[in-house]
Structures are given as C-alpha cells and as structure tokens.
Image: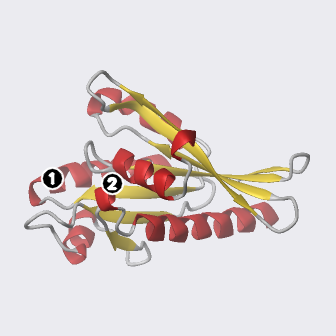
C-alpha cells in the first residue's frame, strides 16, 4: 500500500497470477470493461496476442471527501519463456488472484504455478491475501474445488471462486474479496 497525502490517494497493487492460458488476461479485460475503464488497461503482448510481460491498469475508487483508492491491477505472464518476469511483477504486491484452469489435464500446470507463487511470496514481511478463481467452469469435465484444494494443498483459509472469465462469472466477486482483504492487511501492517 502506498499512501500519498499530497494527492490524497492510496495505491493497492493486485496481481493476477497463474499458468499460461488460464484466463488471467481475459479476466482483467472483463473486469476493466465491466467497470468502464477498458481504455485504462495496457497489455504487453507478442504478435499472436499472448501476454509477453504483463497487463496493467488502474481502477480508481473515489471515497467521501477527496481521497481516492487506486487499485493497480497487473497480470504476470504464465508462459515459461518469460518466467523471470513474474517475480518482478510481484514486487510491492498487496494481494494475488490465482487463476487456476479447471481442465483435468492441466492440473500439473496449476500445481507448478501455485508452487512457484507460494515460493515467491513466502518471504514477504507480511502474509499476502490470496484468492483463487477456478476458471473455465463451463468446460465439460471441469474439476471441483475439493479436487483443486487437494491437488494444490490449498488451505481452507484461501477463498476459491468457480469462475468463467470470458463471461465475467465470479470475477468481480473474487476481485472485491481480494481488494477488501488487501486493504485490511495493508492497513494492519501500516499500523504495526
């Protein structure tokens, strides 16, 4: 959390993390479009439209008075070729939305990405709030939450939302919970 008293803004950084093609960019694009900020989103893509480095943009929430909370939303690329960029994107993060792919044959990719995320955030000074979107629930044979929790060893304290990013199903809900948790955790760490 970054507090700028001069401009009366609070900055919160939220990162979408997960394996390649799990729906991170789709979820972010849907989120920004639904909140009428599609023009505030930037994507660094390769020539075939895959995220090379990240997507990023800011969604402002105006509070009573003149204060604004800026949600700085980023995605970390899931492609292994760009693996070295993921820890850079996570610097200064206040919360993470992990996009898991519901397809059975991609459980290993989910497991590897979750393990990488846990290794990157365990050294943080304070625990980072994490929410999981179990994405692509509209596909036949989509795995259930219990299976994901078991395979990835996800603690019960981490909320899991069954989602369909291309339809926006449970994307705002997951974002809201993470945003609230990130604000709460950041405020507590500032007062400690």
- Whether residue 192 appears in this view of the structure is no
In the rendered image, which quarter contains the C terminus? bottom right
Q: Residue at x 32, y 58 (%)?
A: 165
Judge left or right: residue 23 versus residue 4: left
Residue 63, percent across and down? 78, 65
Residue 79: quarter of image: top left
Q: Nearer the viewer, residue 153 or 81?
A: 81
Residue 146: quarter of image: bottom left
Circle 1 sits in a helix, a strand or a loop, which is it? Answer: helix
Q: Which residue is mark 1?
A: 106
Q: Residue at x 31, y 66 (%)?
A: 163
Q: Which mark is residue 129?
A: none
* Mark 2 surroundings: few (<14), some (14-19) or many (≥20) residues within 10 A: many
Q: Residue at x 61, y 63 (%)?
A: 182
Q: Residue at x 26, y 63 (%)?
A: 152
* Mark 1 surroundings: few (<14), some (14-19) or many (≥20) residues within 10 A: few
Q: Which residue is mark 2?
A: 114
Question: Which of the two discs, 1 and 2, sits closer to the camera?
Answer: 1
Q: Nearer the viewer, residue 160 or 116?
A: 160
Quote the CA–CA distance across marks 1 and 2: 12 Å
For marks 1 and 2, the one nearer the N-term is: 1
Q: Nearer the viewer, residue 90 or 164?
A: 164
């Amino acid at each position: 959390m970054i507090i700028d008293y001069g401009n009366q803004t609070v900055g919160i950084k939220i990162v979408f993390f997960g394996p390649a093609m799990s729906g991170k960019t789709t979820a972010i694009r849907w989120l920004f479009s639904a909140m009428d900020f599609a023009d505030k989103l930037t994507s660094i893509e390769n020539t075939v439209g895959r995220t090379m480095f990240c997507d990023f943009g800011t969604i402002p929430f105006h509070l009573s008075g003149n204060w604004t909370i800026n949600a700085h939303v980023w995605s970390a690329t899931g492609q292994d070729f760009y693996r070295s960029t993921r820890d850079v994107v996570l610097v200064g993060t206040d919360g993470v939305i992990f996009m898991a792919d519901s397809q059975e044959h991609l459980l290993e990719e989910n497991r590897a990405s979750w393990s990488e995320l846990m290794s990157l955030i365990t050294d943080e000074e304070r625990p980072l709030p994490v929410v999981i979107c179990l994405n692509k629930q509209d596909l036949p044979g989509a795995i259930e939450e219990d299976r994901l929790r078991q395979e990835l060893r996800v603690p019960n304290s981490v909320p899991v939302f069954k989602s369909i990013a291309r339809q926006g199903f449970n994307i705002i809900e997951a974002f809201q919970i993470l945003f609230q948790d990130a604000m709460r955790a950041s405020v507590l760490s500032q007062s400690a």
